[in-house]
Image (tube, rainbow, N blue to C red):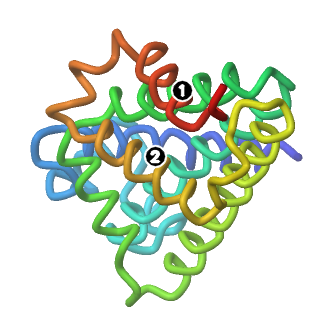
Amino acid sequence: MNGFEKRSAQKKHAILKAAAEIMNGPEGSKALTIDKVTAATNISKATIFKYFQSKDNLIKMVFKNFMAEMAYDAEKTLQEKRSFPDTFTALTQLKINRLDHVSQQFYLDLMAYYSQTEDKELAEFMNGYAKKSNETLLTLFQQGRKEGFIDPKYTDEFLFIYTESMIAGIAEPAIYTRALPYIAQWSEVLLKGLAPEK
């Protein structure tokens, strides 16, 4: 990477960081304006539009960046080769910690973007993210069965639904703030429910 490319990468990072901070408030993405990003970064409007083309595209890139960082952290956790219970607890803690650092409106806006299908590029990215998440869960389920922590009678389909519904529930802003001190216990109770009968 030459000097020009390095400066461009630094500016893009600064713009995304500033935009994410502006969006991470009570108004969510509605609060974002290019003027605010310019004021926060001292980067001209022309440069911001050169890199991101539009405010909507900047919002999209903030969400993509957020999701990509979550995926990267999950992959790093898997590579640590911990036991199934420790890996499951670590991945759960990772997701809760991420969500604990964003506002309720940021999360709601993210979910709205996640579920839309009009933007083909974004839909493709989200489908790829969902596919990768499912592959991660599948690997985790296989590890759990192999180590004797998951009863073989539970199918992958059931485990996907079970895990996602529990995570979706605990990710609710009214719940996860209360649940944070109990992540280890929550994971333990969840895993005991999947364990083979003795």
Q: Residue 53 appears at what percent x and percent y?
A: 45, 74
Q: Label 2: how many residues lie within 10 Å, few (<14), some (14-19) or many (20+)?
A: many
Answer with left or right where residue 33 lies relative to residue 45.
left
Query: Which residue corresponds to the image point at 11% horizontal and 40% vertical from the top-left?
Result: 26
- How far apart marks 2 and 1 lie (CA) works out to 45 Å
Residue 109 is marked as none
Nearer the observer: mark 2 or 1; the answer is 1
Answer with left or right where residue 75 lies relative to residue 61.
right
- Circles 2 and 1 in contact, beta carbons < 8 Å: no
Q: Residue 95 appears at what percent x and percent y?
A: 48, 35
Disc 1 element: helix
Which residue is at the far left?
Answer: 26
Which residue is at the far front?
Answer: 198
Q: Residue 116 appears at what percent x and percent y?
A: 35, 79
Kind of residue at badge 1: Lys
Q: Label 1: how many residues lie within 10 Å, few (<14), some (14-19) or many (20+)?
A: few
Which of the pair 179/8 is nearer the observer? 179
**Image quadrant in which you'd find residue 178:** top left
Query: Which residue corresponds to the image point at 42% horizontal and 30% vertical from the top-left?
Result: 96
Kind of residue at badge 2: Ile
Disc 2 element: helix
Query: Which residue corresponds to the image point at 78% horizontal and 41% vertical from the top-left?
Result: 145
Q: Identify the residue under disc 2.
A: 15
Query: Which residue corresponds to the image point at 34% horizontal and 17% vertical from the top-left?
Result: 180
Up-down: is 158 above or below 185?
Answer: below
Answer with left or right where residue 124 lies relative to residue 55.
right
Up-down: is 158 above or below 18?
Answer: below
Q: Residue 159 appears at what percent x and percent y?
A: 57, 54
Which of the pair 18/160 is nearer the observer? 160
Q: Identify the residue under disc 1.
A: 192
